[in-house]
Image (cartoon, rainbow, N blue to C red):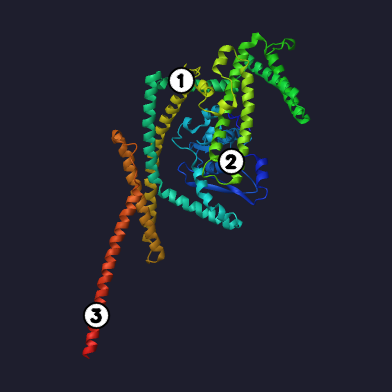
Amino acid sequence: TGPTSCESNFKATNQIKSLQKFKHLDDTGIFGSTCRHGIPLKFLNLRNMGERYVLAECLIDHFQQQFSKSNQKFIFLYDIACFLDAHIANPNNILYPYLERFTWAVSIFHAYAHTSKCQQKYHPRVIKSVGLTDGESLERLWSYLGKFAKTTKYMKFGHRLDIIGTALEFHYQKSVEKLANNLFKRYKNAKKVEHESLEKLSLLNQQHNIDFKLIEETIEKQKTSEYAFKHHLEGEHAYFELLMELRSINIETTKINNIKKKELLRKKHDNILKKIENYEISLSIPKTHRWDPMDSKYSAYLEFYCINQLSKFIDGLRKERNEYLFNSSYLYNEFHKGQKLASKIKNLNANALTNINKTIENYNQTREFLSSTQKKKYLTASIKNVLDNQSNFWISLDIILDENCNIPRIIMYNAIQNFNNLNRSKEEQELVKSEITRLVIFWLEQKELIEKAIKFQEKKDGIYCNLMKELDKISLNLEIAKNMKNKIFGDDDNNQNIIYDEDFNFIEEDEEERYEEENEEVEDKEEENEEEESEEEESEEKENKEEENED
């Protein structure tokens, strides 16, 4: 795979782990896709395999063939979209010719397991045209399908697929029927996010003089500086970084006794040495005058290198801390799911603590190379203050001035976050408007098809009855969609009258109540008719008996 801006190590798509985990199972899982509203689209049953890039490629290829016009674009949200992007960017990949049609984003909950540099590029709130889509619809779908796990795990292959297929079909139908209500709910939420974001941005502007122009400039500078450092770190800075890497490898080699690890380090040492020699040729530096990274005359390069390294360590500490705290909260949750899961979480926490301690050691060692002025900005790290997100260690990092705008990082971060939320909420409103319009057209077309089918039915048989029931259902969905469309487009004329915290009563429920009332009235009438008929029958019987007695 090609280079990626994310340096996190994920288990997803790890073939060795998946083979070890599932080697005793026939069916090893389901891999699938939904639209942004959580409606199931296409699913693959996995046999003797785990999660792989080829599965995602299979689904993507299916969609790009189904919508084959070059002007039709796709936005894919995936847990490890950063890695998949780099994988498909390989010229040998089958999807490489269609790369311009694809935009990638990491699903919003999983994004926090990625580095901050990765989030700057792949977080759904920074990507245009995504709206307020969170990309976690499959997680909600897995929660629904999880109810079938206990019953299907002992079934035969075909029977299991039938049950899961039926469950997905049912979920699909219900999702489509409720889509109009959900669109209106999304529209109200987008209005709420827009309102809250504007209020927060207005407050930041008053307190810190942060306007839209400054936010846009800061975002652009962050992108430019990250790109320059990641992809175009050239000349003397790149040469110095290689020298520091060589130095750290030499130090690590002296501490290791394992022969295999020493051999790996030796190969790494040789590769870096070749790169250093190439830079020395391009920079006209004789081998006899190779720089000593610890020499005082190279202090400016050293400080630049150390600050960038510290940023990486801080990202790692923040990610590991969040993972540790999340697992700990789940471990001591009253709704825990047994000893097996508790043991697994304890092992995860033990690994997280090991990683945190290693990163703390690297952080503190790198910090020692900073000047006294810079050391004040980066406090000494310890396991206690790293795990406490309210400690002075984290507070001091938050109040460091952003080099792009001279405003504390935490404040600028909040400004950028609200700015992105504002833009995405506006996009969401436009998306919902186009979607509700298409939904009304869809139900109109469905209604016409059913009406045509009814006309061709000569006999009032079972097919006719089913078509009439389907027509009633479609007519109800059409009425709901039209009502929602009127409400959504009507809100534009009454923006000042929007109540953001009002309870939303679904039209579908109102319609159902109306139909229930009508049914009750019909039932009451039927009961009255039955009573009248029974009274008539009783009177007839009495008359017959009287006639018999007279005879």
Q: Secondary structure at mark 1?
A: helix
Count neighbours of disc 1 (C-alpha within 10 A) and say few if under 14, some if 14 to 19, many if 20 or more: few
Residue position marked by numbered label 1 in the rendering: 217
Count neighbours of disc 3 (C-alpha within 10 A) and say few if under 14, some if 14 to 19, many if 20 or more: few
Between 442 and 209, the one lying in front of the other is 209
For the residues marked 3 and 2, what is the alpha-carbon distance in whole angstroms? 78 Å
Going from the N terminus, do you reach mark 3 or mark 2 first? Answer: 2
Q: What residue is at 47 percent from the left and 23 percent from the top?
A: 410
On the image, which quarter does residue 361 sit in?
top right
Q: What residue is at 31 percent from the left and 60 percent from the top?
A: 519
| Quadrant where the image shows the N terminus | top right
Q: Amino acid at mark 1?
A: Glu
Do the residues bearing badges 3 and 1 touch, measured as CB atoms within 8 Å?
A: no
Tell me: 550 left or right of 441.
left
Q: What residue is at 50 percent from the left and 26 percent from the top?
A: 390
Residue position marked by numbered label 3 in the rendering: 540
On the image, which quarter does residue 261 sit in?
top right
Q: Secondary structure at mark 2?
A: helix
